């Protein structure tokens, strides 16, 4: 059986005849309940809405033309409520682009800024024209194209993995393969990323989180600094929410935009890898009152944006404007957008940038029960889709551990990042926060969830990370004491100053072999702790082979070697890659780290923190060393699953004792980031070293022990 993504068209419209003629085009009233533009057997249906506008005109352009070849005003009879809809007969979707003009009152103090001459992009456009080639600045407004939305997905079931069973790999589509060293044919594209799937399978991750792939204009705020052109490289200024970024496509896809992306997603799924999209519903690329008017401002500025009493823009996003997410019209757009990507692109999850904005009222105040969040959490189409919140915003609202509707939503665990970064470099006063974080942040996400298979809510609520696109890479975290953002052109005033990094004794690159060895050990420490922490681990692409951004912790504008992954480092740091690979596999082999299992037969408690003496289950607030134990009975393997994680950020040896196990169980050393005399840092099960009771943790190292039957 073949399953296709396609738009349902009522049969009653198949044999329709025109009722009128406008500008020489036969037309009739259209499908008022279908947003956007849709191809029909008899023509094209165009549907838009505006609450405060008084008239609407459809503009038709030849491909790549700046001036329309036809202007079709919507007759009054083609309007129901605030919705305009018209079928235009005889149009060939491969021969035209379209846009709109809306007329209405101009009263900025009351939020009304209609401009009858502004060329407006359809808010529901499935494809944005003229953005095919990266870095090409196009004159004029944004036009849309009508898409043939047909793709054979086969009999592909939706993933049933829980959040706790994921290892997430965050990447930038262009930067992942654009460096010449990537070795792919289609550098910087969806097709190029598909070429790297064998690498991702070897690494062992089972979910990718793609930085924004909705259509954005990388040239919008371009500037030149010291002879280098800076672009909106990250893509967090959305132009079209329903359209894939066409500059990430390797070949022309006129009216088939999205095919290459769908092929990529299908290939990921065929290889057991889920796809999560980083989505930006907190603001748009239109900016504040000084920004352009190309879409929402022209349709209904007062509806789509949060406005101050005098008509200016609230800026909780830090990017000039803030979407009015809890207005019913905006809620509907966001819901339909997520449904579209879930159904038409089979996306597995969404990470919401600055998600606290989604919980603000129209006046900017926080809502106790935000309608949008409840709507998304309870929507039947999104029922099995992962929803991940960056639970803060630029307006100062910080909701880590208390994001509304948290039993349905997961969160980026900002406290995990901050406390583990600090503790691992030797800030011992973060010991308690670090212990809570490794244990699953039960103080933030604990609690019983009867709707989650009698599991604890926290297991699927927190995404643990030490690095992401925003901040230092893992290598830079242990190579720089401070950010080095001079290339961004803001005198290094941009980017966070709270990095909790340590250069290991030398700022930046060094030939000192001891510092190089220490940095690699610190990266292994970070990886081992991350993969042995309860919650969903996420790390930044390239961390597994020590990719660097030369100390730039805010490379949002750097479309160059600063941001592109240098794949030469994979061969140079193959040993680090092997360690990441081992730790990811170790996590998957030990479900006790990821979830609550039945009680262990051996009698160990399900989870506990320990001092250097395992019998002492209290740790000082400034403990120089701490340990965490996980224990449970694995019914699939029919045996106890026991893991003991020991973390020593101290710069001297520390002697620890392990929990006593009754025969035939014993502890075996699985990971030692210090290494042994043979240069090994991790051990397959048949090479593990038995540890009877005591172990010497070497300086600034992590050890992981596995309890199992001794033969």
Image (cartoon, rainbow, N blue to C red):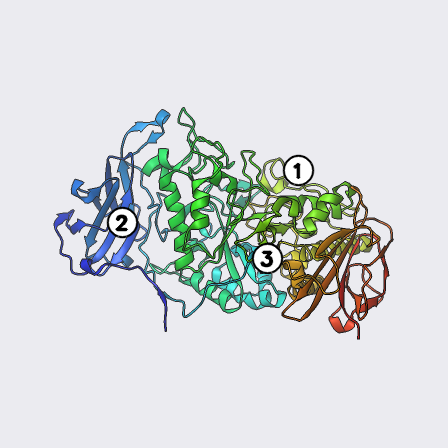
Return the disc, 3 or 1, that comes first in the chain's sequence.
3
Mark 1 — residue?
497
Choose the circle earlier in sequence order: 2 or 3.
2
Give left or right: position of 625 versus 143: right
Secondary structure of the residue carrying numbered label 3? helix
> At 53% from the left edge and 44% from the top edge, which residue is drawn?
230
CA neighbours of label 1 inside 10 A, class few (<14), some (14 to 19), many (20+): few
Q: Position of residue 65 (x, y in %)?
A: 30, 49
Q: Position of residue 431 (x, y in %)?
A: 75, 44
**Which circle marks residue 33 in the picture?**
2
Disc 2 to disc 1: CB gap under 8 Å: no
Residue closer to the observer: 439 or 11: 439
* Inter-mark Cα distance, 2 to 1: 49 Å
Q: CA distance from mark 3 to mark 1?
A: 31 Å
Please name the residue that numbered disc 3 is placed on: 164
Q: Which mark is residue 249?
A: none
Front residue of 174/437: it is 437
* Foreground tag (2 vs 3): 3
The label nearer to you, 3 versus 1, is 3
């Amino acid at each position: 059986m073949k399953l296709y993504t396609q738009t349902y068209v009522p049969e009653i419209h198949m044999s329709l005849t025109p009722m009128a003629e406008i500008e020489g085009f036969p037309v009739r009233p259209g499908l008022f309940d279908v947003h956007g533009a849709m191809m029909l057997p008899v023509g094209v249906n165009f549907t838009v809405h505006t609450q405060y506008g008084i008239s609407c005109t459809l503009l038709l352009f030849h491909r790549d033309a700046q001036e329309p070849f036809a202007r079709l005003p919507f007759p009054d009879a083609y309007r129901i409520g605030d919705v305009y809809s018209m079928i235009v007969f005889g149009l060939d979707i491969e021969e035209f682009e379209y846009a709109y003009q809306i007329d209405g009152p101009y009263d900025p103090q009351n939020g009304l800024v209609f401009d009858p001459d502004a060329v407006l992009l359809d808010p529901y456009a499935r494809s944005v024209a003229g953005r095919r080639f990266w870095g090409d600045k196009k004159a004029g407004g944004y036009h849309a194209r009508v898409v043939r939305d047909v793709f054979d997905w086969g009999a592909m079931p939706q993933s049933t993995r829980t959040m706790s069973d994921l290892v997430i790999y965050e990447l930038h589509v262009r930067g992942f393969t654009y460096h010449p060293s990537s070795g792919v044919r289609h550098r910087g594209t969806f097709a190029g990323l598909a070429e790297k799937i064998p690498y991702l399978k070897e690494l062992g991750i089972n979910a990718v989180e793609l930085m924004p792939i909705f259509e954005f204009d990388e040239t919008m705020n371009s500037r030149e600094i010291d002879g280098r052109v800076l672009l909106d490289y990250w893509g967090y200024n959305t132009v079209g929410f329903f359209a894939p970024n066409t500059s990430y496509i390797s070949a022309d896809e006129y009216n088939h935009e999205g095919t290459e992306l769908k092929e990529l997603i299908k290939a990921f799924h065929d290889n057991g890898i889920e796809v999560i999209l980083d989505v930006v519903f907190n603001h748009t690329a239109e900016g504040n009152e000084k920004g352009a008017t190309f879409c929402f401002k022209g349709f209904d500025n007062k509806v789509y944006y949060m406005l101050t009493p005098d008509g200016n823009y609230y800026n909780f996003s830090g990017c000039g404007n803030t979407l009015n997410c809890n207005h019913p019209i905006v809620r509907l757009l966001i819901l339909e957008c997520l449904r579209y990507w879930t159904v038409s692109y089979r996306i597995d999850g969404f990470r919401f940038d600055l998600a606290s904005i989604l919980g603000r009222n129209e006046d900017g105040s926080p809502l106790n029960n935000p309608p949008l969040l409840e709507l998304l959490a309870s929507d039947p189409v999104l029922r099995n889709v992962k929803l991940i919140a960056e639970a803060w915003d630029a307006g100062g609202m910080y909701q880590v551990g208390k994001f509304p509707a948290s039993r349905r939503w997961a969160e980026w665990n900002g406290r995990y990042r901050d406390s583990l970064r600090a503790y691992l470099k030797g800030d011992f006063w973060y010991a308690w926060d670090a212990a809570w974080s490794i244990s699953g942040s039960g103080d933030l996400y604990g609690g019983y969830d009867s709707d989650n298979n009698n599991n604890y809510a926290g297991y699927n609520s927190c995404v643990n990370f030490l690095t992401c696109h925003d901040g230092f890479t893992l290598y830079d975290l242990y190579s720089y004491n401070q950010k080095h953002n001079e290339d961004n052109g803001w005198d290094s005033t941009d980017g966070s100053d709270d990095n909790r990094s340590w250069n290991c004794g030398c700022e930046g690159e060094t030939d000192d072999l001891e510092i190089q060895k220490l940095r690699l050990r610190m990266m292994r420490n970070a990886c081992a702790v991350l993969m042995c922490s309860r919650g969903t681990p996420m790390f930044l692409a390239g961390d597994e082979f020590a990719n660097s951004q030369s100390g730039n912790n805010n490379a949002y504008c750097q479309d160059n070697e600063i941001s592109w992954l240098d794949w030469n480092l994979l061969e140079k740091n193959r040993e680090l890659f092997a360690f990441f690979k081992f730790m990811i596999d170790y996590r998957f082999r030990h479900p006790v780290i990821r979830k609550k299992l039945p009680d262990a037969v051996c009698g160990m408690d399900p989870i506990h923190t320990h001092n250097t003496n395992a019998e002492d289950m209290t740790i000082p607030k400034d403990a120089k060393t701490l340990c965490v134990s996980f224990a449970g009975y694995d019914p699939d393997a029919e045996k106890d699953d026991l893991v003991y994680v020991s973390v020593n950020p101290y710069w001297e040896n520390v002697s620890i004792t392990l929990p006593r196990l009754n025969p035939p169980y014993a502890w075996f050393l699985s990971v030692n980031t210090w290494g042994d005399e043979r240069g090994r840092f991790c051990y397959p099960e048949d090479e593990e070293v038995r540890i009877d009771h005591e172990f010497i943790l070497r300086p600034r190292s992590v050890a992981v022990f596995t309890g199992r039957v001794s033969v």
